[in-house]
Image (cartoon, grey):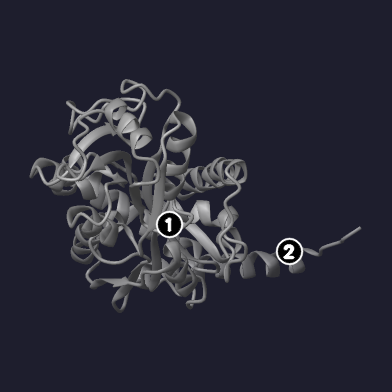
């Protein structure tokens, strides 16, 4: 049994108090220099769409520049590894995506452990995916017409994705399995290049986040056939859901959120979460997120951590069912 004298107990109390004061001092003094937010996909994609306006807003709020550092490649895992191996001092964050929860089970090996090397901070945006086609290459104006076209031209309909093992890759595989369509997968190094490929006619269609596809849909450059959320998007009420289009049980939501290197002081993580929540509650970002068909994040870190854990489990099941392994 452990026995403590009154003097010993007082000593422990002083140490605990000093530790708490030191922890609080982290957030009080932070930031004293620019903060780097690593976006692990090329510019022009869904992550980038939300990262840059958020970074500008955060810069104004915290009094230091928040720099977006694009580190694309390998389905977002290169940038994630950069952050996982960065100093846990509160000056480097990852603005990643749902794809990172897929990579946990899809990649044969990763140079980092998402659950051990990175700490969830908060969500940034939650947005449905949308099935979009190049209207010049695909005459289909509905999902049923696309399926018929694909079956009539087996292995000649190509769908792009933001990389092997991403949710957009799996969305196409699930679509094939559910509908009997025959579409070939063409991986790109990010959703920005995939969208460029679609606009340029290299591929026939993609499943893309509604946020990064919105401007092209409104401009008539691509045709939206269905959203992959349970309900229609308030920003695009004319686009049917996949269930309404004849493919029930098909749901795929994109989301983007912040992680910090493991070991980052908890008070700094809490401060960043609070600053993000404050930024997302601003009228300008609320309006911008709505235009992109997105729901804002900003939830407490504990809630976001539960979302990440749930997504790892969900996509792990999909990866195993489809026998997807990425070297």
Up the image or down, 320 lies above or below 202; here it is: above
* Quarter residue 273 falls in: bottom left
At 25% from the left edge and 41% from the top edge, which residue is drawn?
Answer: 132
**Tag 1: Cα neighbours inside 10 Å, few (<14), some, or many (≥20)?**
some
Is there a contact, CB below 8 Å, between mark 1 and mark 2? no
Query: Which of the pair 155/248 is nearer the observer?
Result: 155
Tell me the tag on residue 270.
1
x and y percent of residue 148 in the render? Answer: 33, 29
Viewer-proximal residue among 300 and 248 = 248
> Which residue is painted at 47% across and 66% down in the image?
77
Mark 2 or mark 1, which is nearer the start of the sequence?
Answer: 2
Q: In which image quadrant can residue 149 be found?
A: top left
In the visual, does 319 lie left or right of 218? right
Question: Residue 229, how many percent across, how many down?
Answer: 35, 31
Left or right, residue 301 beside residue 256: right
Which residue sits at x=36%, y=57%? 162
Residue located beneath label 2 in the image = 9
Using the image, determine if residue 134 lies above or below residue 16. Answer: above
Q: Name the quadrant of the N terminus.
A: bottom right
Residue 199: x and y, percent?
18, 54
Work out how far the residue at label 1 is from the one at label 2, CA to CA, in angstroms: 30 Å
Please say if 232 is above or below 280. Answer: above
Where residue 30 appears, as percent x and y from the top left, is 36, 71
Determine whether 146 is above or below 243 in the image: below
Q: Nearer the viewer, residue 102 or 198?
A: 198
**How many dots with numbers?**
2
């Amino acid at each position: 049994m452990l026995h403590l004298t009154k003097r010993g107990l007082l000593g422990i109390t002083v140490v605990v108090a000093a530790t708490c004061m030191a922890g609080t001092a982290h957030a009080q003094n932070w930031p004293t220099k620019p903060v780097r937010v690593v976006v692990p996909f090329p510019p022009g994609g869904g992550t980038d769409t939300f990262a840059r306006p958020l970074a500008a807003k955060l810069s104004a709020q915290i009094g230091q520049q928040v720099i977006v550092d694009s580190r694309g490649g390998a389905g977002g895992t290169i940038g994630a590894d950069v952050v996982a191996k960065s100093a846990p001092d509160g000056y480097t964050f990852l603005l990643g995506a749902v794809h990172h929860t897929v990579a946990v089970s899809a990649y044969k090996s990763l140079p980092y452990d998402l659950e051990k090397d990175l700490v969830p901070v908060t969500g940034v945006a939650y947005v449905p995916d949308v099935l979009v086609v190049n209207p010049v290459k695909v005459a289909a104006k509905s999902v049923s017409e696309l399926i018929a076209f694909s079956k009539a031209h087996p292995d000649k309909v190509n769908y792009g994705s933001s990389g092997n093992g991403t949710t957009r890759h799996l969305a196409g595989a699930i679509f094939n399995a559910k509908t009997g369509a025959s579409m070939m997968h063409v991986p790109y190094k990010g959703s920005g290049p995939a969208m460029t490929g679609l606009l340029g006619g290299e591929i026939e269609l993609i499943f893309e986040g509604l946020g990064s596809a919105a401007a092209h849909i409104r401009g008539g450059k691509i045709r939206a056939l269905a959203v992959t959320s349970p309900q229609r998007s308030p920003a695009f009420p004319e686009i049917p859901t996949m269930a309404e289009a004849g493919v029930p049980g098909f749901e795929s939501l994109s989301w983007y959120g912040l992680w910090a290197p493991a070991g980052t002081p908890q008070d700094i993580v809490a401060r960043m979460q609070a600053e993000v929540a404050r930024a997302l509650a601003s009228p300008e970002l609320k309006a911008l997120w709505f235009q992109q068909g997105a729901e804002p994040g900003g939830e407490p870190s504990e809630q976001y951590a539960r979302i990440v854990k749930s997504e790892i489990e969900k996509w792990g099941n999909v990866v195993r069912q489809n026998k997807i392994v990425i070297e």
